[in-house]
Amino acid sequence: MEKIFIKNRNGQKIAVVIEQPEGKARGLAFVMDGLSGIKESLHVRAMAESFLANMFIVVTFDFRNTYGESEGKYENANVTNYYEDLEDVVNWSSKQNWYQEPFWLAGHSLGGMCAGLFAEKYPEKIFALAPIAAAVVGKLIIKKYQTSRLEQYKIWEKTGIREETSSTRPDLIKRLNWHQFKQDLLKYSLLDKVSKLTMPTLLVVGDKDELFEQQKILFEKLPGKKELHIVKKAPHTFIEANHLTELKQIFDKWIKSLN
């Protein structure tokens, strides 16, 4: 395992980890977390370890404006920042001697949206895609919040701050600049250019995830070889050991079926 710090297009620091398999690599995979997430998250590790076990080089990294090792403050996080970081990490990787194309791309939640956006822009670079519990359509996410989180949503709109307790770190209170995040999110949808996603695509979502319906919408519109797996009793972020085991098994079987 090698951890380095690279500079993004604006000279800001991004923490990147490169893991090599024991033996000749059969492919390259980029794996990323979502909003506020870090490269060490349990579900990120589950995906990364599945690729490593199948002899892939794996690149994970912390987006800027998370609670990881990259620069920036969480309050400034948005889709645009995260997507640019993905582009910059791939661009840096393309100059390394271990780089391969086409590569595999996996991301959770907002990272899943970024993975999909990247695959739509650069389909020739992607061998297979895994937007896990992905944010699919910004407008639909905001609409969902207005029903599933109405009281919270009213507070966010009034104060301009989205404040919530981390699902993986109960001691952490996350505060996001809501208005800038919302306006940025509303600009994005994976459905606008979904016809570009002709590569094999894996969707995994918990049946307790408030983004569950969006996965079904995306799945129906995907034009290529595709799989949708529903993890019973799992929330948006996979935390429980049995859910993480199932996620890892799904990835392992998917990778083997294509590799």
Image (cartoon, rainbow, N blue to C red):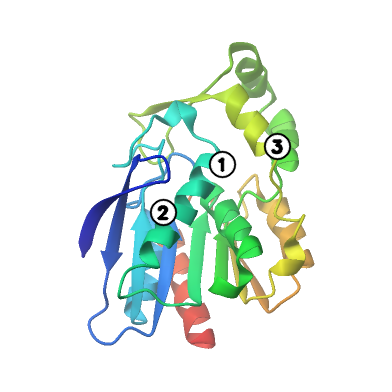
User: How far, Cα to Cα, is label 2 from label 1?
Assistant: 30 Å
User: How far, Cα to Cα, is label 3 from label 2?
Assistant: 31 Å
Q: Are marks 2 and 1 in contact (CB under 8 Å)?
A: no
> In this view of the protein, which residue sits in the foreground, 203 or 170?
203
Give the amino acid at mark 2.
Glu
Q: Position of residue 27 (x, y in %)?
A: 40, 80
- Mark 3 = which residue? 186
- Identified at 64% across, 61% down, the residue is 121
Q: Using the image, tell me which numbered label, if any, was put on residue 80.
A: 1
Image depth: mark 2 or mark 1 in front: 1
Q: Position of residue 183 (x, y in %)?
A: 67, 30
Classify 10 Å Cα crowding around label 1: few (below 14), some (14-19), many (20 and above): some
Q: Is residue 103 visible?
A: yes
Give the amino acid at mark 1.
Thr
**Mark sitting earlier along the chain (2/1):** 1
Residue 48 located left or right of residue 132: left
Image depth: mark 3 or mark 2 in front: 3
- Mark 2 = which residue? 240
